[in-house]
Amino acid sequence: MKVKSRVLNYLHLDRSFSLLTVKNTYLVLEYFRFLDVHNKNKLNDIQFYQFMRHVTNLDKRQIFLVLDMLDQQATGYIRFQEFYLLVCILIALNDRVEKQFIFRHSKIVFEMMDEDGGGTISADEFGQYGFLFNLKDHSVRDIFFEFDVSGDEELDYKEFKMFAMACIDKQKELDEKKKVKMLKDMASDQPDEDDDLD
């Protein structure tokens, strides 16, 4: 997922706690109030969709998956608490500190991804919401079963915490390989200096 909001480019998470400062929290609250055109202290699905469409490159299906993940009581809207969490995730992605964010807030992330509330996350659940943390489905499935210590094809919280860190490391490794390959391809397309002298 790509964050494309100018407003969020100016906000950063505290490095120690992966949270916003009080000043930045107040700015996010004002942003939330600006979006809350009905003055109900909540954003409905249409307001949420428009916000996400404006600040990310997610498609409609993904945006509504995020809404469902945040709206765990199925009320059809999100309050400031969920909006704050979402903004923190977006800032973490924008600043490329999603690993630290997941590490610091692993219990919250686990509960968000645990769609059925069963206390475990399947590979399908993790793969379904992995896009929110820039995890590709293949990096998730490649190492999922390595961390399923109990062998039940689901991760409990402890297994999830180890798995999430490994997935992010695997994704960064794949991205780095892709970048190196691209640089090699670009270098091979460059004409040699000796060719210019001929």
Image (cartoon, rainbow, N blue to C red):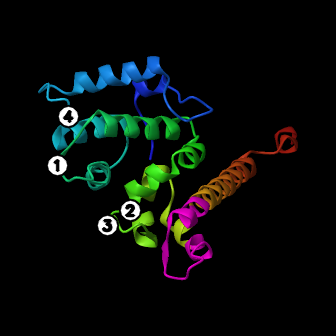
State yes or no: residue 192 in magenta: no
Q: Which residue is mark 1?
A: 75
Q: Which residue is mark 4?
A: 42
Determine contact: label 2, label 1, CB under 8 Å. Answer: no
Disc 2/disc 1 C-alpha distance (Å): 18 Å
Say if 136 sits above or below 1 in the image: below
Q: Position of residue 8 (x, y in %)?
A: 43, 27
Q: Earlier in the sequence, mark 4 or mark 3?
A: 4
Q: Earlier in the sequence, mark 4 or mark 1?
A: 4
**Number of the label disc, if any, that sits on residue 94:** none
How would you rate the neighbour count of disc 1 (Cα within 10 Å): few for under 14, some for 14-19, many for 20 or more? few
Say if 130 sits above or below 82 in the image: below
Instruction: Look at label 3 and name its amino acid.
Output: Asp
Instruction: Look at label 1 and name its amino acid.
Output: Thr
Question: From which residue to which does the magenta span run?
Answer: 142-163
Secondary structure of the residue carrying numbered label 3: loop
Q: Which residue is mark 3?
A: 116
Determine contact: label 3, label 2, CB under 8 Å. Answer: yes
Instruction: Look at label 4 and name its amino acid.
Output: Lys
Secondary structure of the residue carrying numbered label 4: loop
Secondary structure of the residue carrying numbered label 2: loop
Quarter the C terminus occupies: top right
Q: Earlier in the sequence, mark 2 or mark 1?
A: 1
Instruction: Look at label 2 and name its amino acid.
Output: Asp
Write the residue at 51% across / 46% down: 105
